[in-house]
Amino acid sequence: VTDIQGTSGNQGGDQHSTTGKRPRLSGAQRRKLLRERALAEGKTLPKTPPKLKERRRQGPKDEGRTSTASDSKVTPPPRTKGGKRMASVSPRVEGTNSRKLKRQKTGATYAAVASDLPRVLLTCGDYLGGKMPPGVCTKLQEAVVNKMLSLEKGAFVPKFEDSYPRQGSMVFVCLDKGTVTWLERIAGDLDLGDSNLKVRVVLPSELRVTKVLTWLPAGVESVDSFFEVVGRQNEVDTTRWAVLSKSSDGCLILGLDKPSVVTLKSQNFTLLAGVKKATFRLLNCNTAKGGVKTQVEGSAVGQS
């Protein structure tokens, strides 16, 4: 046994002498070595501090103060790219919780800004008060763009915010009054490729729309079929009728001009519609912004 220990000891010593480095001790081994040296020298060992869990369990020792859950929760500073923690701590605002603060609404929405911009309405043919086909709307927009491209360098350049169809016309939202003047001046020169589609500016007083409520009768599947059968059986011009709203149960809200409302009044607000009768009810007599109220009285309530 002695030979084996001596041999192993020599081997360890040879290995240590060849490497020239002392074996690396762990933290527990170093603490144990320090305690042994202190006991050998007759020194008294210091008392070990209480564990961290015991400290958190004891809480603060301030008199008259109760411990809270936030005392035991310490948020470390954020890490940097090098892995070290920064010493800066962000201040906490009183009266707020850990949830994200909601963004305050300023009220500056697109609708609020666009509502104050000037508008120019252009129409062509007999579409005013009815529905302008999508192809005609596209031609009208292309005609305005082509007119802009034909301007000479240094001339006034119009600026638009938006354009959309409305009641048989195209609404052009302008960014300045100069664009309004330019569009009103060149409206009569716009060419849509059809002699019957003469472009003109629509006055606000021309957009007189009365909301009328009715229902699709039995046997009529679509709105187009409803307009066609009502026009044929009652000899009424339904091409100027506009659908403002349609629900899943067949309820329709139509936008009618003054001549159509007068026709409904003469028929006691009841028209033939296929194999049944359709009853109409006036919802209001208001016109578009800037227009005049239509003086229509009387209405019929109910559904046939």
Image: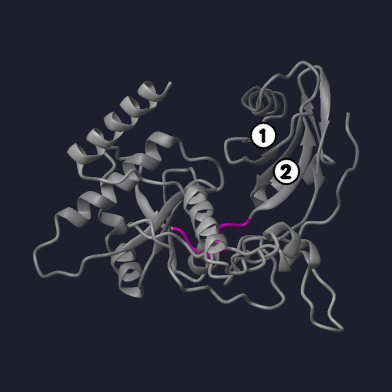
- Image height check: is 62 above or below 234? below
Give the residue at x 37% y 21%: 4
Spatial distance from mark 2 to mark 1, Cα to Cα?
8 Å
The answer to whether 96 appears left or right of 5 in the picture is right
Image x and y of residue 149, in percent: 17, 54
Q: Mark 1 is on which residue type? A: Val
Image x and y of residue 163, in percent: 41, 53
The circle on residue 236 is 1
Question: What kind of element bears circle 2?
Answer: helix
Question: Label 2 crowding class (10 Å Cα cut-off): few <14, some 14-19, many 20+?
Answer: few
Residue at the limit of the structure toward the left, as seen here: 153
- Asked whether 69 or 17 is in front, the reply is 17
- Asked whether 174 or 187 is in front, the reply is 174
Q: Mark 2 is on which residue type? A: Thr
Q: Pointers 2 and 1 in contact (CB under 8 A)?
A: yes
- Image height check: is 217 above or below 104? above
Residue at the limit of the structure toward the bottom, as seen here: 63
Q: Is residue 207 magenta?
A: yes
Question: What kind of element bears circle 1?
Answer: loop
- Asked whether 182 or 173 is in front, the reply is 173
Q: Which residues are magenta?
A: 202-208
The answer to whether 118 appears left or right of 105 in the picture is left
- Image height check: is 201 above or below 235? below
The circle on residue 263 is 2
Q: Is residue 128 magenta?
A: no
Give the residue at x 8% y 65%: 153
Give the residue at x 33% y 47%: 141
User: Which image quarter: residue 44?
Assistant: bottom right
